[in-house]
């Protein structure tokens, strides 16, 4: 039997109402904050992610699904949404909608990771990018938007972890300090971090290895190194965040996995123990340089991405309130034509309707109608057909009434 690829799964009809629910709430919140949806292809040139995500990131180093097209161009399934959205922003000159452009996306991402709870090879992200605003207002707005999504989904026990990681001016000094610090613990770092020390020492702070984590706990912190601009930005953001009353902590070691971040970075973690080790629901931050690095105009932006699968774990008790308005039951083969006509008329009028295609026993037909959550059933028997009528039975009250076929068909 052929099966899905490890770490990839089908979303079944029994699960889909939860997905629709989350998507609907997110779309409403995006509308409240004036974001417009953008959809980009799932396949892009590998060069986009190499340049847009960064050669030294986990994603590009080891997680991408990359293959050659027939003309030998290297292509990759998108591992994240920001680089494609930035590409689309540049390619379609969306920057002409000045002063700002606010976009959101929802879609499947692909990363070759070790599959486990909350970590898959195909997973979904809902995210947004806010282009063209340098003010901490934009950072606060993004944080407010996220908290609104989480609140409307009734998610409890989440905490924002907010940091600043400086800018091109001040970060090099911090990187240097980190490199010095970690060099003193070189032998105790994992192999990967030993290599990262030269290329990207900030990434050691993000390592999941327990020894590296322990060492990182006493490392120098960024706030002692940031320049005045970055410091003011951070302080102004925190003032705005205080107004929206969200649970947050300032955590000077939140660095995020991607290369392009400046100043604000943040993550939201679930702290009720439901998600286990993979308890980061979402991450985001401010970036500059990315738009110009991909040949667009110098533009600062801020964005975030929620992992939808992790979010769904937290919604387990959303009731699956599936229902259908009518189930039409022809009691014999001769009534199938009329069942089809009645169902069609009701559907055109906007009702949800299904027809039992078997002319089986009434008992099993009623059982099926119950299973579908039918509000009413329409019974068409031999006698009814003769009189151009049908019986409508309300499934909740069991009340029955005789109706005229002509009334429903017109
Ligand atoms: P992690 O540290 O858990 O690997 P990340 O830093 O790689 O996360 P991002 O690239 O920031 O994650 O993606 C944002 C969100 O997407 C994460 O917080 C998480 O909820 C979700 N996510 C990332 N990778 C996966 C995956 N393989 N399976 C399911 N969800 C994922
Ligand atoms: Mg990861």
Image: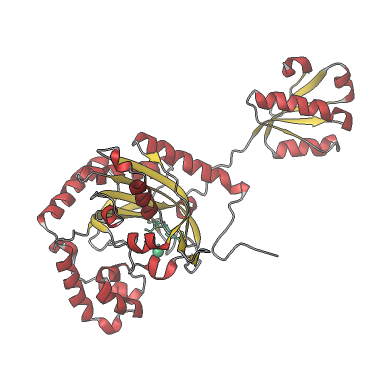
Q: Using residue 341 as the reference point, say whether residue 170 is left or right of it.
A: left
Q: Is residue 381 visible?
A: yes
Q: Is residue 404 visible?
A: no
Task: Single out the residue that lies furthest toward the bottom.
Answer: 187
**Residue 277 in the image, given as x and y percentages of width and height:** 42, 64
The type of colouring in the image is secondary structure
Q: Quadrant of the N terminus?
A: bottom right
Q: Using the image, determine if residue 48 lies above or below residue 382.
A: below
Along the viewing direction, whichever of 395 and 141 lies nearer the viewer: 141
Question: How many numbered badges does the structure rendering display?
Answer: 0
Along the viewing direction, whichever of 189 and 82 lies nearer the viewer: 82
Q: Using residue 198 as the reference point, say whether residue 173 is left or right of it.
A: left
Residue at screen point 34% across, 79% down: 190
**Residue 306 in the image, given as x and y percentages of width and height:** 40, 51
Along the viewing direction, whichever of 213 and 332 lies nearer the viewer: 332
Task: Single out the residue that lies furthest toward the front.
Answer: 71
**Residue 205 in the image, given as x and y percentages of width and height:** 28, 68
Along the viewing direction, whichever of 73 and 148 lies nearer the viewer: 73
Residue at screen point 30% across, 37% down: 97
Q: Using residue 143 as the reference point, say whether residue 228 is left or right of it.
A: left
Task: Classify residue 261 by image quadrant.
Answer: bottom left
Residue at screen point 74% across, 18% down: 409
**Residue 96 in the image, given as x and y percentages of width and height:** 29, 39
Q: Quadrant of the C terminus?
A: top right
Q: Using the image, determine if residue 179 lies above or below residue 102.
A: below
Q: Using the image, determine if residue 117 lies above or below residue 364.
A: below
Q: Using residue 78 as the reference point, say whether residue 392 is left or right of it.
A: right
Ligand number 2: quarter of image: bottom left
Task: Classify residue 400 by image quadrant.
Answer: top right
């Amino acid at each position: 039997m052929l099966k899905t690829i490890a770490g990839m799964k089908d979303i079944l009809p029994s699960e889909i109402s939860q997905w629709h629910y989350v998507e609907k709430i997110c779309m409403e919140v995006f509308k409240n904050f004036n974001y417009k949806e953008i959809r980009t292809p799932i396949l892009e040139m590998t060069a986009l992610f190499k340049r847009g995500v960064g050669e030294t990131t986990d994603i590009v180093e080891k997680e991408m699904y990359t293959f050659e097209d027939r003309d030998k161009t290297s292509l990759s399934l998108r591992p994240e949404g920001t680089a494609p959205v930035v590409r689309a922003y540049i390619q379609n000159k969306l920057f002409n909608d000045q002063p700002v452009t606010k976009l959101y996306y929802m879609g499947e991402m692909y990363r070759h990771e070790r599959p486990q709870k909350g970590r898959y090879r195909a997973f979904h992200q809902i995210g947004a990018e806010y282009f063209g605003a340098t003010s901490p207002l934009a950072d606060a707005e993004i944080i407010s938007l996220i908290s609104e999504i989480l609140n409307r989904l009734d998610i409890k026990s989440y905490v924002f972890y907010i940091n600043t990681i400086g800018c091109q001016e001040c970060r090099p000094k911090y990187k240097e300090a980190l490199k010095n610090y970690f060099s003193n613990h070189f032998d105790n770092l994992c192999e990967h971090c030993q290599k990262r020390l030269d290329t990207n020492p900030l990434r050691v702070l993000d390592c999941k290895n327990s020894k590296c984590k322990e060492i990182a706990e006493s490392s120098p912190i960024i706030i002692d190194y940031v320049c005045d601009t970055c410091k003011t930005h951070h302080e102004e953001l925190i003032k705005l965040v205080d107004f929206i009353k969200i649970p947050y902590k300032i955590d000077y070691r939140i660095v995020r996995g991607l290369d392009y971040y400046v100043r604000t970075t943040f993550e939201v973690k679930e702290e009720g123990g439901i998600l286990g080790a993979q308890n980061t629901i979402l991450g985001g931050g401010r970036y500059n340089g990315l738009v110009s690095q991909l040949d667009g105009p110098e533009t600062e932006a801020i964005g975030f991405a929620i992992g939808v699968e992790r979010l769904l774990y937290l919604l387990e008790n959303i009731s699956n309130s599936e229902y259908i308005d009518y189930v039409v039951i022809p009691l014999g083969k001769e009534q199938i034509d009329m069942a089809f006509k009645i169902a069609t008329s009701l559907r055109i009028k906007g009702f949800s309707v299904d027809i039992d295609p078997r002319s089986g026993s009434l008992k099993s037909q009623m059982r099926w109608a119950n299973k579908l959550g039918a509000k009413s059933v329409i019974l068409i028997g031999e006698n009814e057909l003769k009189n151009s009528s049908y019986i409508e039975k309300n499934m909740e009250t069991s009340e029955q009434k005789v109706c005229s076929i002509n009334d429903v068909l017109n």
